[in-house]
Amino acid sequence: MKKKKELVISLVLIAVLIGILRLMEINISPQSKWAMLMTVLKKGSIYALVAVSMNLLNGFTGLFSLGQAGFMMIGAYTYAIFTIPADQREMVYMYYNGGIVKFAIPAICGVLLAGVFAAFFAFLIGIPVLRLKSDYLAIATLGFAEIMRALFQWDTLGPLTNGSNMLRSYPTPASASVIYPFVVSGVCIAVIVLMINSTYGRAFKAIRDDEIAAEAMGINLAHHKRIAFTVSSFFAGISGALLAMFQTNVQAKSFNSAMTYEILLIVVIGGIGSVTGSVISSFLFIACSEWLLRFLDEQHVIGEFTVPLMRSGFRKVVFSIIIMVIVLFFRQGIMGTREFSISGILNKISGRSRKAQKGEPK
Amino acid sequence: MKKKVISALMTAALAVSMTASIVAADTVTIGVYEPASGDNGAGGKQETLGMQYAYSQQPTVEIGGVEYDVNLDIVDNESNNDKAVSAASKLVSDGSSIILGSYGSGVSIAGSQTFADGGVPAVGVTCTNPQVTLGNTHYFRICFLDPFQGTVLANFASQNFEAKKAYILTKQGDDYSAGLGHYFDQAFQALGGETKAETFPEGNSDFTSYITAAKNFEADVIMAPTSTEAAALIIEQAAAQGVEVPLLAGDTWDSNVILNAAKDKNVQIFVTTFYQEGGNAEFDQGMKDFINSDDTNLANNGGDDTVAAVTAMGYDAYYVALAALQAAGSTDPAAVNEALWTLTYDGVCGHVEFDENGDAKRDTAFVKSANTETGAWDFVTEQTISE
């Protein structure tokens, strides 16, 4: 009964959220001051998905992997390669006579295929790499991502990946509407949450806490690690496809290790082992880095006084300091391992009021 | 407690950023979409300098009989396609009437859709990749294109050095490098030459084997259209191995980084570029004074007062923007976009007029060589593709 009530409340809240987004989209024109908010919401929701997928691996299964940007790249390229309209290919693949793929599939199929390809590569690479532990796994996955990047830029694969040149002119629903990335990311994150709360999720956490104990309890380590790795990469691939839409072009050079560290930072700031933490921090991180701190890059004159240090690049200095402070003093991140939930808040409020009625100190 | 402090700081940051962009009534905003960090940060800053100098000369513009103050809105696109979208979106949301930039074709293409959605026209300054303006009606550019530049270099190599064999070295993953190399390759082979093309990976710092390969190939010229940091290493290695054949490159090599790397070394370097220092004495002097007037400007120009071609192009771009605003007679981006199609302007880098793609009609490039004794550029010739 209680579960049903919670479900209804959640659905209503989701509907309200979509309604608000739709209203914002209608009322905020690209020229308005708040247009940046829409950009942040789009990119934030895409990063939320990849952050949660990384959290599934790093936070819940305890596999310290740094291959996320590589899997995003596979997803982004898969999406772009298969959805560029056939009549645009001549222009996009101008150095390779239109490329070797001559057909296009609908956008949503492209998104799914992006996930499937990323998962497939993860499965293959997982066979040797998942035998490694902690730091060694991180190095191997990071190396894998770099190798994939070099491979995608390789001239010989040009007819497929367009070599060093960018892919573009594919359909970009996530760039056109803010609801699209929200819905796709939302559904994917919901699936991840369901998985975390299932038998698999409990097995993942057991592996994270103590591998030997988990094995003694009858959990197949290799099997579960492979599942976590593949599923995480599947969703990283999907977020890669969304990012491709957001950017409206794909080029391998932007999927570098700095991108992986950015995602890792989001996970750490949000709290390792908290899904809602990752989501909240990805919106915060994107908002700060791309919007709110931009005024630091501009020169300001108050009366006769020119504010010192404010010039192009200062934003990054301030941003780095903020991040250092967070990592040094708030190591738990925003949420730690706790989760944010509506019912939790409701319980807290009702609990407090009950206590207040009894006259107990808070 | 800590959380309260954080939330207070966040609110403060939000408040400041909101108030920061309040502008006066009769103001027209020109967006500057240039990298100030990342791979192309150095070139982007030089290009922005030209615009800032032009702005210091002419900070107002008369549009439809009303005097407007120009607000030069400079945003860093970080040379990164991923960050470029939000930088572009910032410029559109600041109410830009026209946007200038960028150095680097990749970010220009990345921001293009955002400008299109916002209905704001953009004028590329030195983005030479054909794909920037292809298939859209809002992106223009005032520079020449890679197919042109590659052909010019191939003609120059075969005419001046009677080159029969060319070694082409490009950077993997860099669309500018790959594109220019590709067009040079095509044009050189069409002239009856033989080529050998190789790529080096990003972050490579040892060019020994590539230079050796070029020597073994008995190349008459080495074509290396790369970014400046790789260029410095290539020059060093070429000098170390006593390469006597000329090194050729495109507009990116027109930088004081190259001059410093080549100084007192026995190498021949030839580049194609948009502007030759000395082409307009008045502009050169003004630009040098502007660079020397301020430490930040000097640092942004790479520490000395050599006028880079991209700076001259930035200067022209600003005046093209003003001319477009005047021709439109309005600050409405759509009207400015319309006016750009028929605009003509004569700047320090030559005549600007747009063709049906929105590309400037350019038929000559300047070729100059690095003087290894004085550390300056020497004018060689004006090269066209028709000869």
Image (spheres, coloured by chain):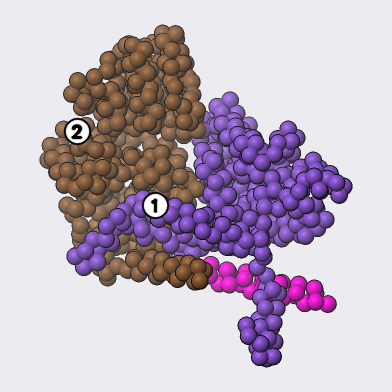
Label 2: element kind:
loop
**Mark 2: amino acid:** Glu
- Discs 1 and 2 carry the same chain letter: no
**Mark 1: amino acid:** Val
In the picture, residue B9 is in which quadrant?
A: bottom left
Instruction: Please say whether residue B209 is one of the residues in the magenta stretch.
Output: no
Q: Chain in brown?
A: B
- The residue marked by circle 1 belongs to what chain? A
- The disc label shown at residue A335, or none: none
Instruction: Please say whether residue A9 is one of the residues in the magenta stretch.
Output: yes
Q: Could you tell me which residue is drawn at 80 percent across and 74 percent down?
A: A4
Residue placed furthest toward the right: A218
Q: From the image, which quarter does the N terminus of chain A lie in?
A: bottom right
- Residue indicated by mark 2: B277
Horizontal and vertical percent position of residue A297: 35, 55
Q: In the rendered view, does A352 fall on the left or right side of B121?
A: right
Badge count:
2
How far apart in space, not on screen, are marks 1 and 2 (Cα)?
35 Å
Q: From the image, which quarter does the C terminus of chain A lie in?
A: bottom right
Q: Main secondary structure of the magenta part?
A: helix
- The residue marked by circle 2 belongs to what chain? B
Residue B200 visible? The answer is yes
Foreground residue, A66 or B305? Answer: A66
Foreground residue, B72 or A83? Answer: B72
Mark 1 packing: few (<14 Cα in 10 Å), some, or many (20+)? few
Assess whether mark 2 and mark 1 are in contact (beta carbons under 8 angstroms): no
Palette colour of chain A: purple
Q: Could you tell me which residue is drawn at 33 percent across and 39 percent down?
A: B43
Question: For the magenta stretch, what is the residue range?
Answer: A1-27
Foreground residue, A360 or B71? Answer: A360
- The disc label shown at residue A317, or none: 1
Residue A91 visible? The answer is no
